[in-house]
Image (cartoon, grey):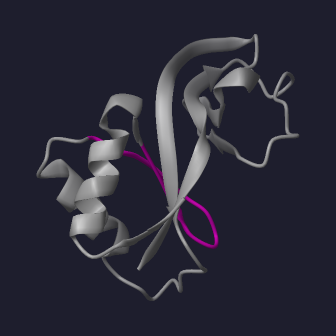
Amino acid sequence: MELKIINQDFSICKLKNLSQIDYSDEFCFISKTDEELSLVCNTKLVPKNAIECDNGWKAFRIQGVLDFSLIGILSKISTLLAESEIGIFAVSTYNTDYIFTKEENFDKAIKILEDSGYVIKP
């Protein structure tokens, strides 16, 4: 399975509202529930109205479009990384999954996955 590294720094934020989000970047993930409004975005584009923000995240995605019938793809990746005490933040889209790790763990995470048979695309 191929994993594609996304070469930018990400922040995970809690927002008051959507009014100050910069949608011009290629990657912008928004989640809304009855309890919160969350945003994952380029660190350079964190809105001024962020209530809380955690910087220092790097990401990769599973390449290609994943069929909804596929089972265990994200589970396998998260298990491999958890065994090395690397936490993840995952975002699923209609097409695929995006996996975020803290910057200080990113290179180690990529090495673990590469050693486990994943093909890494820069």
**Magenta region, residue range:** 87-100
Q: Is residue 94 inside the magenta stretch?
A: yes
Going 58% across and 24% down the picture, which residue do you hit? 13
Image quadrant in which the C terminus is located: bottom right
Going 49% across and 20% down the picture, which residue do you hit? 54
Decide: is 26 above or below 113.
above
Q: Residue 60 vs residue 37: left or right?
A: left
Q: Position of residue 113 (x, y in %)?
A: 28, 63
Image quadrant in which the N terminus is located: bottom left
Q: Residue 70 vs residue 47: left or right?
A: left
Going 61% across and 11% down the picture, which residue do you hit? 51
Q: Is residue 9 inside the magenta stretch?
A: no
Asked whether 57 or 108 is in front, the reply is 108
Decide: is 44 above or below 119.
above
Q: Quadrant location of residue 108?
A: top left
Q: Position of residue 115 (x, y in %)?
A: 22, 67
Q: Position of residue 10 (x, y in %)?
A: 58, 33
Asked whether 21 or 24 is in front, the reply is 24
Number of callouts: 0
Q: Position of residue 22 (x, y in %)?
A: 85, 31
Q: Residue 69 vs residue 24: left or right?
A: left
Q: Residue 50 vs residue 58: left or right?
A: right
Going 36% across and 66% down the picture, which residue do you hit? 74
Asked whether 95 or 31 is in front, the reply is 95
